[in-house]
Image (cartoon, rainbow, N blue to C red):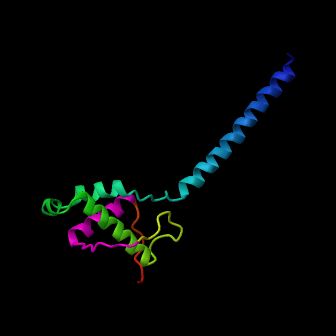
Amino acid sequence: MSAVLIVASIIAALLVFVIAAVIIGREARRLDSVAPRVVYELEQATQFVADNLPSETQARLTYAELRKLLVFHMRWLHDKGLQPAGVVDRRQDIVDEVVIDEQTLTGYLLDFDAIGAIGPQSND
């Protein structure tokens, strides 16, 4: 191989590396500036809220009831326009009456804060 071919190969390799480094750096900066998407997983939320409830509330509330309360709360948020319009789960009929006490609501808010779902205050 001639010296010219070796030098051209080295320059081409360096050029490819520089282009790749610039593109990867630009995309990394762009992705870093976008807030991560908040995903609400019902089972994870149920476990989180249950773990953060006071012991007297935990004694009165089952996981199934807490799960129903979380579903009810998400439906309420949807009714108030505080959920995105393109959600996967649509509202269904609620046949059981559900009651939310202050400790359960505090658990919800702690869960929302933990997953980064709390934003600016609504005017409604």
Q: Quadrant of the N terminus?
A: top right
Q: Main secondary structure of the magenta part?
A: helix
Residue drawn 58% across and 52% down? Answer: 29
Give x and y (percent) for residue 13.
Answer: 75, 31
Give x and y (percent) for residue 119.
Answer: 42, 69
Q: Quadrant of the C terminus?
A: bottom left
Q: Quadrant of residue 65?
A: bottom left
Q: Going by the image, does 83 lie left or right of 98?
A: right
Q: Quadrant of residue 20?
A: top right
**Is 104 covered by the magenta stretch?**
yes
Residue drawn 29% across and 54% down? Answer: 47
Give x and y (percent) for residue 91.
Answer: 44, 71
**In this view, 74 is above or below 32:** below
In this rendering, the count of numbered labels is 0
- Looking at the image, can residue 5 be seen? yes
The residue at the far front in this view is 95
- Looking at the image, can residue 109 be seen? no
**Is 28 covered by the magenta stretch?**
no
Magenta stretch in the rendered image:
93-115
Residue drawn 33% across and 65% down? Answer: 70
